[in-house]
Image: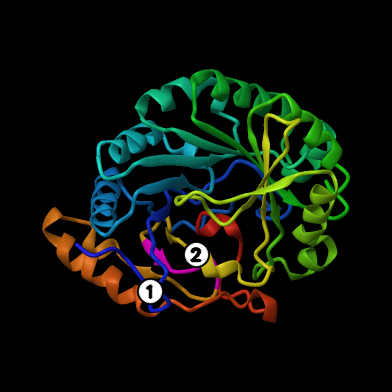
């Protein structure tokens, strides 16, 4: 079966698969009022996830990131990991988490087949962490990161959203942390969503500013690996950890796009922004539907735009990043 490719020649071998919209944190840039169920959500069942993974694996997907909301809130999260790991065409299984369950379950998830993990830590100051997340769980999350390192994960990444007026003074503290700790620290530039225009205007901080500081301090750019995401990675001979910058407002950000998204309700999203998504769930009920599902995937890729329209202030239908897995 031919690999997914759009009309601009981009190939897609990376799927971000959301398994829930629910999150127990109240991050100011994502869910400042906390998760509010609408009473209608019914997230993909394990059997539907298995059929989804099987179809994507037939069209070249080699990396799957299990996302949310907070994916570890699903009681069958370990079973989901196993279901993905059972497909031998999937070479890399990752997840993104707020880390609150990591301390207790890191080894269990590793044994199930999870190999890469991203933990959201927007500040190394416990008070600022609480101010951003709405939860007083900094120490718990940090112990979880230690547990992940001990469990043997091949890559542990820390995600921090850049926020002017909140964590914009934290760079020295982060750099000190990764001097002796072998983790990848990723700064993510704040993106405007439908519910966050005022917040964006007040707190957006350009990733290019951080990049300039790193270069001045002797950090060097690392050439990306084939399955890397959109981050520009930097390393320093005096630091065990690396730094990645995700800068969606930088020119040509979309040129290297290699990922697709499926929401927790089974909708395919060709981009984090701009469109409503295409329902796949009707074709996730039986293995016999796989050929039709693959055909639908190929048909949708032909309609993918060359770029997002964030530079024009167009945020599309995405109301908050938790709704389709960030």
The residue located at (49%, 30%) in the rendering is: 154
Q: Which residues are magenta?
A: 267-273
Quarter of the image with the C terminus is: bottom right
Is residue 115 shown in magenta? Answer: no
- Quick check: 286 left or right of 65? left
Q: Which is more toward the observer, 26 or 54?
A: 54
- Quick check: 100 left or right of 201? left
Which numbered circle lies on residue 186? none
The kind of secondary structure element at disc 1 is loop
Q: Which is more toward the observer, 166 or 43?
A: 166
Image coordinates for residue 261, horizontal then vertical, percent: 44, 60
Q: Residues within 10 Å of mark 1 (few under 14, many from 20)?
A: some
- Callout 1–callout 2 Cβ contact below 8 Å: no
The residue located at (88%, 45%) in the rendering is: 169
Residue wearing tag 2: 257
Image coordinates for residue 201, horizontal then vertical, percent: 81, 68
């Amino acid at each position: 079966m031919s690999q997914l490719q759009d009309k601009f020649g981009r190939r897609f071998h990376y799927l971000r698969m959301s398994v829930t919209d629910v999150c127990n944190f109240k991050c100011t840039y994502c869910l400042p009022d906390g998760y509010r169920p609408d009473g209608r959500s019914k997230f993909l069942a394990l059997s539907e996830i298995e059929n989804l993974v099987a179809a994507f694996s037939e069209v070249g997907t080699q990396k799957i990131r299990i996302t949310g909301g907070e994916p570890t809130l699903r009681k069958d999260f370990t079973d989901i990991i196993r279901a993905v790991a059972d497909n031998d065409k999937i070479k890399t299984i990752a997840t993104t988490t707020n880390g609150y369950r990591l301390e207790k379950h890191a080894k269990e998830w590793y044994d199930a087949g999870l190999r890469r993990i991203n933990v959201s830590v927007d500040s190394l100051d416990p008070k600022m962490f609480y101010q951003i997340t709405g939860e007083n769980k900094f120490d718990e999350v940090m112990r979880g990161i230690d547990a992940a390192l001990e469990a043997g994960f091949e890559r542990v990444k820390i995600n921090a959203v850049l926020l002017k007026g909140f964590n914009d003074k934290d760079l020295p503290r982060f750099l000190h942390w990764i001097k002796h700790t072998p983790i990848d620290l990723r700064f993510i530039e704040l993106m405007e969503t439908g519910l966050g225009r005022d917040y964006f205007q007040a707190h957006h901080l350009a990733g290019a500013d951080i990049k300039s500081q790193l270069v001045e301090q002797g950090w060097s750019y690392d050439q990306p690996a084939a399955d890397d995401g959109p981050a520009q990675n930097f390393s320093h001979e005096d630091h065990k950890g690396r730094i990645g910058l995700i800068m969606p407002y930088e020119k040509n950000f979309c040129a290297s796009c290699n990922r697709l998204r499926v929401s927790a309700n089974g909708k395919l999203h060709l981009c984090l922004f701009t469109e409503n998504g295409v329902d796949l769930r009707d074709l996730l009920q039986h293995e016999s539907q796989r050929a039709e599902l693959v055909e639908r995937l190929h048909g949708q890729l032909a309609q993918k735009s060359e770029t997002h329209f964030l530079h024009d202030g167009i945020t599309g239908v995405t109301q908050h990043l938790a709704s389709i897995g960030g």
